[in-house]
Structure formats: C-alpha cells, structure tokens
Image (cartoon, rainbow, N blue to C red):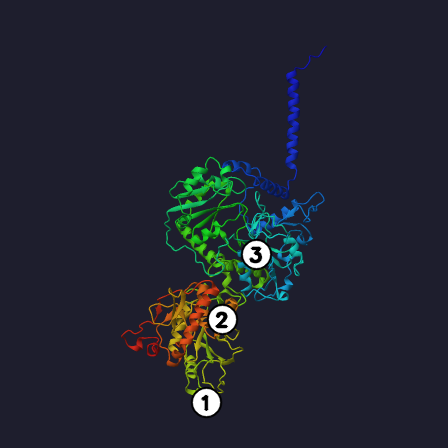
Amino acid sequence: MRRRPRSPILIIGYITLFLGFLLLLFLWSWQRLPLSDTTLSSLVVTSSRISHQFPDPRTTVEKRKEVDEFYIPESEPYLSVDDLFDYGAQEEKGKKGDGGEPFLDDEMGFSDLHGHGRPVGDDDKKRSGGPCRMETCFNFDRCQITGALKVYVYPLDKFVPISSTYEKILNRIMSSHYYTNDPDEACLFVLSIDTLDRDELSHDYVRNVATRLKKLPYWNNGENHIVFNLYAGTWPSYNETELGFNVGKAILAKASMSVEQFRPNFDISLPLFHPSHPDKGDDLGTAVFNEFPTHKQHVIAFKGKRYVYGIGSETRNSVYHLHNADDVIMVTTCKHGKNWKDMKDERCDEDNKEYDKYDYEVLLQNSTFCLVPRGRRLGSFRFLETLKSGCIPVLLSNGWILPFSEVIDWSACTVMGDERALLQILDIVRSIEPEKIFKIKQQTQIIWNQYLSSVERIVDTTFEIIRDRIQKHSARDLLIWNTAPGALNFDMNFADDIDRFPFHHTGNDNSLRPNFTAIIYVHANAAGPKAVGAYSNSALFRLVKNAGKSKHISKIIVMWNSNRAIPRVWPEVPVPLKIKQATSNTVSQRFLSDEEIETDAIFSLDEEILLSPDEMDFAYSTWKLFPDRLIGYQSRSHYWNEPSEMWHYSSKWTNDYSMILTGASIYHAYYNHLYWIKVPPAALLLVESLQNCEDIVMNFLIVRTTRKTPIKLTWKKIPQDSARSQLSPDRFKQRHTCLNDLAEIYGSMPLRRSNVRLDPVLFRDPVSNLRKKYRQVEVQS
C-alpha cells in the first residue's frame, strides 16, 4: 500500500521545530558560559572611549542615554576609593595581548599606554601585579618618619621657559618649610621642567621632556618624584594619557583625572585652576551672606560655552531644556574657537542672544546651586568659581576623580549628578531641605578656604596628603580634614590626642589640661638692673612672686635672652621655677615649645609687665572658654593709609583693635609649636633681623589659623619704662615695616578688627569689693 506523501506544510513545521530546539539549546549553553568581571570592565572602558571621540553636537541626552544603556553598568558615576582598587586591577588585565604582555612598538617604546602616557612595564607591576601604589613604587627609606616632608626642586634651566602658573608652584615650594637644597636630604623631588600644559597646540607646551628627564641625576625612572599636570591631550579627543613622556614610578598630581587612569593611593587629583589664581594669601571668597534660610533669586544657574564640534558638549547642548528665565537660568553660547560660525547649529543664534542677557558673577552670587558640567576635559574652572562664591556645585562629569578626594568628603559640599540624567537635576535640587542647603554651603567655604583658595594651599594640601601616606602613625583623621580649621593647621607630631589641640572644644571643656605655665621673657632691650644684687625689688622679681600666687599656676619658666648676669637667688614660689638660657639671640626664643610645658595654656609675660594674681586668674578663666584665641591685656590696631598706600601700626586707645601684645597674654601651647613649623621662613628671618615684631607674627599665625579675632581683657596701663620702649620712634617705624613686609610674605592681611572687651562680673560697678571675685583687677587697672 502506497504511503501518502507528507504535506509541504507539515515538513516546514518539523524543520521549524528542529531549528527552534537548536536555538533554545544554543541560548541555554550561552547563558551557562562564564562572563568575567574583567571582560565587562574591558567592554565598558572600550565603549566609553569610542563614544567620546567624535560626538555629534546635536545629540540629545535622551539619544545618548539609549546608547549608553548598552554598556554602562548600573552604578554611581563617581566611584569610591575602595571601588577604584578593583577597577584598576580589572582594567590592567584587560589591556594585555594574547601572550599576556603589553605591546611595545613605537618611537617612545610603547603604543598600548597604561595610565599616564607610559607603558605597563615591570616598574608598574610589582609583586601585587597591579599599577603603582606607595608600597610598590615609592622608596620610604628616603623620608623621615617624623617632622616635615623635605622636597628638592631641580635647578632651573634658563633655556627652558616655564609658565607663570608653574612658577607659582615652584616659588611656593622653595619659600616653604618643605624645601631643601640638599638632594640627599630630600624625600620628594620636583621637576624644574614645566609639565603643567601637555597640549601640543599650547604656547606653554615644553618639547623633548622625555629626553630632558633622562638627563636628571636623581630621576631613577621617577622614583620619589612628583609630576604636576593640569592639561593633557589635544584637539579633538583631548586624551588624558597623552603627556608625551613616561612618568614611570613618579606620583602624578593631575587635574581632570578619570577613574580609568587614576592610581589609588598613589596619584593625586588636583583642581583645575586659572593662571590668575592667587599664588598665596587668604582669598575669602565672595560668599558674603550666611543667612538662613537661603533666599536666592535663582534655584540653579549655568552660564557657559557649548562646543558645536568636538568632545565635551553632550550635557551643555541640552541644558536649554531646563531654562525657564525665572528661577532656573541655563544659558550657553556657541562662540568658541575660530570656526564656530562654520559649525554652528540651528540653536546658536537664539542661545547667543539669551546668553548676553545675564552676568556670570551676578548669577554666582544670586543662585543657590550652580551647574558644573564637564568641558573638553573632565574638570573645569567653574568648579572653583562656584565654591568661591558659596554657590553649591551640581556636578555633571561622570568618571571624574574629584580634587583631593582621598581626604575631602565632597558629598558634604556638592550635589553629584549623572550626565545621563540631566532632566532629573531640578527635582533633585528642589527636594533638598533648607537645613541641608545651609550646611552644604558652610562646608563649601571650609573646603575653599582651607585647601583651594590659592596655589599655596593647593601645593601644601598635595604634600600633606603624601606626608600622611608616609607617616601613617601620625596621619590625620578625615574628620580633621573636613572640619575647620583643616588638616593644614594640624600637626599630629604635637600630640596623638585630638583633645590636646585648641580646636573643637566647647566652653570650659574638661578635656583641657588644667592650669597654665608662665613664661617670662627677659630680653636685652629691657630696662633691668645692671647688678645681680639689685633684682630684689625689680619688676621681674615682683612678677615672679605674683605669678606664684596665682590659683592656676603650674610652673614658671624664665627665658633669659640677655647679656645681663642671671641672679643667683630667686624669690621662693610654691611651684617649680626654671631659668632657661636662650640658645640664640632672637626674640622668637620666647615662644618656647618643648616637653617642659606640661599644660595646655601658656601665659606669656615680659619682665617689665606687672600683673596681679587676680589678673592672671581672670585671664585663665576666660581662656578656658576660648582656648583657640589669643587673649590679653594690651591691644594694638592696624589701618590702611590711602595716601601712602601702606599698612600702618597704631597704639592709640580706640574702640577697636586687631592685635594683642604677647607681653601680657595667654594662649594655647600648640601655637608655640605651630610658630616654628608654619610661620614662613622669610617671616622668621624678618623677626631675627629686626629683633622685633614677633608678637605681630604670632597674631598673624593665630588669626590665619582660626579666622577669629583676639580678645582684649579690661584695660591695662603700661608701666612707664615699658611704654617708653614700646612707643619709641624707631620701634614704631620698625613695626610699620613689619606689617607691610608680613602682608607681602603672606600675600594678604589676615588681621581682623574687633571691638569686644571682656571684663569681670561687677567690674567697676558701685558695689562692695567683697562681692567681686577678682578684686585686684580694678586696683591694678
């Protein structure tokens, strides 16, 4: 019996079922294949680089997001430091060829660059198998385990020009306590070759850097060197790895550093700052109002350029969607570069017209938040500009390692957005409570003032981060870095316990070590007795007796800096009395800082100043309430003289003051320690040459550290001999000179005026003297 032929439809059905079965089997097998994290990381990095080479200027955020979703993982755009260790190691594995080794083939000896324009070689792959860390590429044997970090700067080559910005960096180093002219003493080495601008189209670009590095006597493939860089790469891609030389094992202090190229615990991310950025001084910024709640005209604002061609304008091309010309100002201009008219798009004319309606500085001052999108590179000048003005930065620069992020908690003073979610920014900033806005704004000023306000502070912060890495036993806690007065004013070699410092104390804090040490300074210019036996009724002996009668005295130290003979017999006092002979003939010797001072409070006294025990006790009681201030009985002031265009020193009794003389003052012992490590060497030389002005320098130091004025107590008449020496024409002329020279050395005038005077309760009130606690204060005044 003949079989009926199968229908063609039935045959097609069998074939379809068979193919479907094969497809399911293939999909099931593919899902079981392991896809490593390394492969994913390589895909992300490769896709990211491709997408940033030649972006379409008219690409909207929505279109960019559709593309990004294929390769960007669901993670925060700003990675934590802990994430970076794994990320760097994964990227390193993904960069090797089939044989597991990097490719080397071009004129510089490499083509597949790892990081900062250098090959992945043995120098960058120590026992950990990953990129450089302090433990693998830094020679700790060259560095001291305590004390200051010593930095050597190579001699300048007069045939190699340097930019004004790099000159500021070098000047700061060579005028600081970090500097040493002995390379054998140095822990770090800084190039005299300007490496800040590595854009080949820039007039500051230095050629043949690689050849010059090989000629340096201590280069040693970059070991213990630090290389500063602000700009890398050139148009159109602005590749940050294009430095034009191999940094080897050198620490790279660089602006606009990305997650892919950053070596955690080794490199340092710098802020991008303008050539006009102050080289030193205290630029307090323009945030003049600290009102709560904040009432600004605009919630958020942005005024800047957008690039009609090239990298870096995906976000800027789309901000106009947020603009409402009311509380949200988002204006851009296409006027950038020489060929912008040839490349302009359909929105350029409208954007340029709207752009001209607003003043940039006015927007900064009248906006609560300021948008900070990436530019050609990840960083931009706008970041520092917004911090300076007190406008809270809203960051849109995915993958950017924020400046000094190793120690600064940027989440406390910025709003971190995502370039892929531009249209959500308004909802984010409007949802932030007024209390948090106020707190964030305050934190922007702390970070700006302490670490970013000048080239001096940027350089110091860089070195102090490295110092904390080297001297880990005395490294400062992140709390210290992110609170006033900041880590630059904390030297943990002074004490291990944070309570030993004058900061972060509440009124009458019991954590302070009780009582005070009186340091009486005897100097050559004082009108003291000529013969040893004439001291019995001298002002010096009376002062020693009165100090011994104080209820809060712990020890008396007499610092003898005079060619007069030291008395053999001294008054009997109930506390230890020690006579110290000055080791050098400088008035700075009065600021004694050694282990003999066992109290937190120091009462600094000149031998001709006579204070009663009650006056000392009242000063100490006041100091316990304000342990970070300079407190005393004799005040002075300064003022700006317009005709001479100079600062003038004044001893007139007015309603305000700006300085307290250290001849009758009380302050924290830490300031004596700080005097010898923070006062610029040029200021110390000035004091030594004039044998004067050490008290002015101490006022500069304390006010610049705390940003708080000194405090005057009651009013005190000066003994005739002391007044004669202090008010002499020569002395006054010297102090005028000191004020102006110190303002030049520091780069600003840190002194602040105050009209606060603290008196004891019932001071000069018409009541019985028996009701007053400090009865002798009025008698001596």
**Distance of label 2 from label 1 (alpha carbons):** 36 Å
Q: Are marks 1 and 3 in contact (CB under 8 Å)?
A: no
Kind of element beneath mark 2: helix
Give x and y (percent) for residue 357: 39, 43
Q: Is residue 614 left or right of residue 684?
A: left
Residue 34 lies in what quarter of the image? top right
Q: Is residue 422 above or below residue 593?
A: above
> Mark 3 packing: few (<14 Cα in 10 Å), some, or many (20+)?
some
**Distance of label 2 from label 3 (alpha carbons):** 30 Å
Q: Is residue 4 above or below residue 154?
A: above
Q: Quadrant of the N terminus?
A: top right
Identify the amino acid type marked 3: Ile
Residue 761 lies in what quarter of the image? bottom left
Identify the amino acid type marked 2: Leu
Kind of element beneath mark 3: loop
Give x and y (percent) for residue 675: 49, 69
In the picture of the structure, the residue carrying the numbered disc 2 is 686
> Mark 2 packing: few (<14 Cα in 10 Å), some, or many (20+)?
some
In the picture of the structure, the residue carrying the numbered disc 3 is 162
- Pick the residue in front: 552 or 84: 84
Residue at x-position 46% and y-position 35%:
346
Residue 247 seen by the camera: no
The disc label shown at residue 533, or none = 1
